[in-house]
Image (cartoon, rainbow, N blue to C red):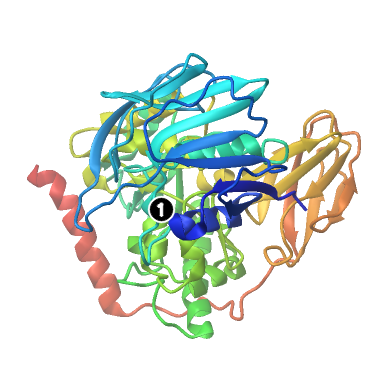
Amino acid sequence: MLPSYQINIRSEVQAVPWVDLVRILEGLLSVKFNFSTQPGPGKRGEIIIEDGNEPRPAGSQEVTPSLRVSREEMQRCDSKPIDMQVRFTDDPNVPFPFRSRSLHTKVAVEPRVLLLNGNQRVLARNERGPVWAVAVEAGVKHFSSGFALPKIPVGGSLIDVLNGERFLEILPLLHWLREICAGSILNGPPLRACFIFDDPNLHWPRYGFVDFRQIAAQAEKENYHVSFATIPLDTWFTHGATAELFKANTSRLSLLVHGNDHLKQELARNYTPRERATLLAQATHRIERFENKIGVPVCRVMVPPHGACSESMLEELPKCGFEAACISHGSLRAHNRNRFWTRSLGYLPSEWIQGCPVLPRWGMTGNTTNIILLAAFLGQPIILRGHHQDLKNGIELLDERAAFINRLGTVSWSNMTRLCRMNYQWRMDGHICRVRPLSRKVVFRMPAQSTRLIIEGSESEFQTGWQISCGNGTDLTGRVGESISLPDTSSDEISMVATPAITSLLQNGANGSPSWALLRRLLTEGRDRFMVHRN
């Protein structure tokens, strides 16, 4: 059990409009917030809310790490977010990957310009002056932020204040809390990325503006991977040369599953358990038939059509052999409005919903710079999705996005199966390696000094044991919280699989689709292909 770090907020609780924010963060981090108007002796950190614009007293010898934030100013309900440019400095206290970057983003309230004393170093500034700073006194860090902490709107969730358009107000708080929890915080997964295009099938060498051969060549040249979410209904025919292209370029091209018939709200309807199992069994049957006949593997990751997927369908996915789903945070919330877990969407590397890992994804166009940087900061996979129309002006769009991502550091570009299996958090505790799986199967390279393994998590998440396969052929079993002795594998790769495998109520996928569903899909595909000729 990880420790709970006590954080004092120097205020009465009723005077703080962002109470919902800190309660959400308590469920995501090993912290407990307490409200008191007096300094908090014995606490691991303290948040101080400032009214004026006085500089922080220098040499105050405060022994508790602190974060000073601005008190929220009154806002009109109909006020629009403020566009702002911020420049991060190259100070080592600026978190990865924001250091030395200039970004355009939005805030709810204009930040207060900080008046600095001689001990403070600027971490970020806007056109008016410093808005984020730090002072280190007697080895203790004291941060100051000109931003008021954001208020979660009524009926809203964390993603309302933590997204590609708006995250500056909360960034100083998240970075400070990570520093407070550094002794127990788990390291995020490695940088990993994939591009996804919805709808393309392998009927011909092209699908609309998607040219498979061109993408394979550019992906090899510029170092990226593209996965195509194909519709199981479309697997009735495959162009032989296109299949061979995919088989010859598995490191750059792959397939995953896009619904079943690609109907409206296909995975979000109010089905009976048997109807859900039947639908997914049919999709699985079609994909298996395609793989056996063509020899092109398909990742068992579900991309719901239009992002529409219910909590009940997510629960069913692992029972039918799917390793994960890939859905945007916004779509998850939109189709599960009454679920309490939607309040905390957006901070973790991935979501765990009813036993199903859900990886986030974002649009290929728009403010992708902020999206990519925020995903890297949070340890989330960088998954940008689009449709064939996004390549209307050329494949350079992918080249540009990939170049920016690759400049972040060493990035693992892969198909969605491998990306899912890199979905974990970890840390060393002496010679004990603590691993928190974020998927039902993970592949992890043990640090050389590891002699024991502890699987982090809760029984509510993992109501199963784990089968652990070591690099030297040794097989082990364990449960959450157990200390497992490791053989002398010397930083070998291990795989961890949740056992026993859960199975669906129904495994017969022989049922057909209504004839109008096939006709609808043929007309849609014809439109997409004709679009190229019109341009």
Q: Secondary structure at mark 1?
A: helix
Residue 347 placed where, x, y %?
A: 51, 49
Residue ID at (38%, 62%)? 156
What is the three-letter code of the residue carrying label 1?
A: Ile
Q: Give the vertical position of 368 relative to 79 (above or below).
A: above
Compared across the picture, whether 92 is left or right of 427 comes to: left
Residue furthest left as drawn? 534
Q: Is residue 107 left or right of residue 441?
A: left
Horizontal side of 23 relative to 195 (left or right) equals right
Whether residue 202 sits left or right of residue 501 in the image: it is left
Q: Position of residue 475 (x, y in %)?
A: 86, 49
Farthest residue, direction top: 118
Towards the viewer: 453 or 42? 42
Quarter occupied by the C terminus: top left
Residue picked out by circle 1: 159
Q: Nearer the viewer, residue 187 or 31?
A: 31
Identify which residue is drawn at 82% across, 55% down: 481
Does residue 137 sit above or below 463 in this rendering? above
Is residue 193 at least partly visible in the picture?
A: no
Residue 434 vs residue 362, the one in the foreground? 434
